[in-house]
Image: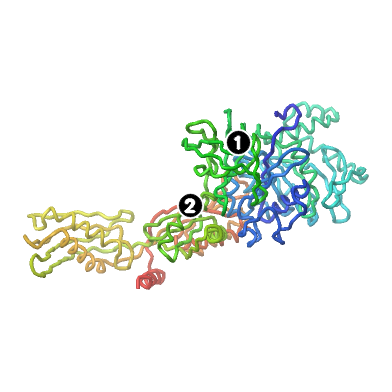
Amino acid sequence: MDQSNGRRPSGSRCVALVGPYLSGKTTLLEAILFHTGAIPRQGKVAERSTVGDSAPEARAHGMSVELNAATTTYLGDSYTFLDCPGSIEFTQDQRAALLGADVAIVVCEADDKKAPALQLILKQLDEIGLPRMLFINKVDKSDSAPRDVLEWLQPASSKPLILRQLPIMKGSIVTGFVDLALERAFVYQEHLESKLIDMPQDMAELEKSQRFAMLEKLADHDDELMEQLLSDMEPPRDRVFSDLSRELAEGYITPVLFGSAEHGTGIERLMKALRHEAPGIAETAKRLGYKGNGTTVQVLKTFHTAHGGKLSLSRILSGEVTDGTVLHGASGQDSRVAGVFTLMGSTPAKVQKAAAGDTVALGRLDAAKTGETLSTTKGSTPQLVKLATTPGVYGLAISVSDRKDEVKLTSAIAKLVEEDPSLSLEHNHDTHEMVLWGQGEMHLRVALEKLQGKFGVHAQSRPRRIAYKETIRKPIQVRGRHKKQSGGHGQYGDVVVEIAPLPRGSGFVFSDSITGGVVPKQYIPAVEQGIREWMGHGPLGFPVVDFSVNLSDGSYHDVDSSEMAFKTAARIAMTDGMPQCSPVLLEPIVAVEIHVPSDATSRVNQIVTGHRGQLLGYDGREGWPGWDTVKAHMPESEMASLIIELRSATSGVGTFTFTLDHMAELTGRAAEQVVASRRAEAA
């Protein structure tokens, strides 16, 4: 239903709970579920008794490690809340989910140190145009007034923050609030609805000035309201609420409320704001660019359950879905729905059908992926979103003790990646390892725990190998002769090769300058093949690059020569000659772009140089006030702990991207240690 006519949107709502790590999102979800009667008592994160964070890994670490969904009702309307992880390592989990939500509640604290983490989240909401409200949590533990907090937080938000409430203080304790839109005062009653009281006399003037400040910001997008304010006319209350609702939906403002999730205060006001001011499914479908009809579904999250198989948490954009509905995906592939469920954390409850606006888990959509748009129309379903994946910044080599379990391992990891696309598995051909990439140490630790706990695969992990290579510094000419007589036909191959270094990045170049047929043409390719087979393991133990070999001379035997004999002769020449070419180790150097709050830039520069990095400079991060981008070249071998140190130096918000840039010589003690380590490994 259109909000411009002043009426509430109809249909079920989908609300994302987002915010920095430890801001209290899971506790807020618990308070909402208790307040709306969905659960008999409010659990606690510390007691591991919450509906959210019900996964063993979440409870073991005392933090959200994946998205949790819970559906409840409030005054006859259905609401599904998506509790998103706060740690930057798990933010991929909310990317697809946010796309299908109507509104986000950004949970934060009155702590200016967490402003950069808040900015990361608000930036993500800006990118997809998702309306948001700010809920300042833990006001019972804060020494700062919410209007002062807004001054700290406003630089993190591209949208004006509009204070909806004023705190009523008793000493240093917040005992209630004044609603600036209603012009009414309330006192908190723990885990009960707030009680209406007379406006405190000492707050009357402050209430008037703060209400006028709120109306002024609303009037920036309402000319009629601006005229009323300029004429000292009191605007109708319905118009104020209509403007709050419209400007929230259109992304002009971010209303700010406050409370204490732990004590259940501020929950009723928050739910009323959602009921009357948050947009509904019609606005969300419009934001996604949906213009079709029939039944269309947006997949928000994929779960693989131990016994129920695959569940696809989905938002119904239009039509309805029942058990047995056939849905078609991006490439026209079809899947039949095997059960429609609402979720209460990890507990599904079967329902007969889901209609437009509902957020439900659909069973056994084996072909569907997170972020995919599905419909009942046969053929390829047009996709409403393109889901970006965050490249991995931390990798571990993984293996299983029994080779026959490798298929089971890769199959389980494929399911993990389906649940969380910011994980990826790389088969590194240079180091002959399987490398699991993720967003940090905790991210991969949780992934390994899920492998064992959910899929029964015990994988060993270790630091990944670095793809060192080697090259040469000086040329040489060398002969390689293979002669063997063992009765009957023998083996004979004789080559003279000129080995020479090439500029960095040239790879390997083979040529021949044979004259007079001293090496028959049919054997020359075998010489090249022999060299290529040998160059995978040079004198230092690593693949050899950036060199040329010219076959200049040799000899053959009419009977005993063969391709195999010349391949062997070529390998002998390389084995004898290469150690005389002054071999040198090469290490991969990566180009890295590090994104950090500006106050951490100097510390990050020290981290880079402390890891043998070469600083290339830094500049303000485009579109990110208060952030810098540091550019550098770093040895890949120094990257393993970079993300850990970076997060430590930036209160958990710094990140980076990197690409292989070039190979550089590594000499001295560092090179000796690498070579010794490889020889010990080979032994």
Does any portion of residue 480 appear in the rendered image?
yes
Q: Position of residue 271 (x, y in %)?
A: 76, 42
Query: Which residue is under mark 2?
Result: 414
Q: Nearer the viewer, residue 489 or 128?
A: 489
The label number, if any, that marks residue 321 in the structure image:
1
Residue 282 vs residue 489: left or right? right
Q: Position of residue 516 (x, y in %)?
A: 7, 55
Tell me the crowding category of disc 1: few under 14, some 14 to 19, or many 20 or more residues within 10 angstroms, Cα based: many
Whether pointer 1 and pointer 2 mark residues with C-beta atoms closer than 8 Å, the reply is no
Residue 586 vs residue 642: left or right? left
The label number, if any, that marks residue 629 in the structure image:
none
Tell me the crowding category of disc 2: few under 14, some 14 to 19, or many 20 or more residues within 10 angstroms, Cα based: some
Q: Nearer the viewer, residue 664 or 419?
A: 419
Label 1 or label 2, whichever lies nearer to me, is 1
Name the residue type under label 2.
Ala
**Which residue is depicted at the point 48% across and 33% down?**
380
Which comes before the other along the chain, label 1 or label 2? 1
Q: Position of residue 417 (x, y in %)?
A: 51, 51
Q: Secondary structure at mark 2?
A: helix
Labels in figure, total: 2
Name the residue type under label 1.
Val
Query: Which quadrant of the figure contains the C terminus?
Result: bottom left
User: Looking at the picture, does residue 408 appear above or below residue 572?
Assistant: above
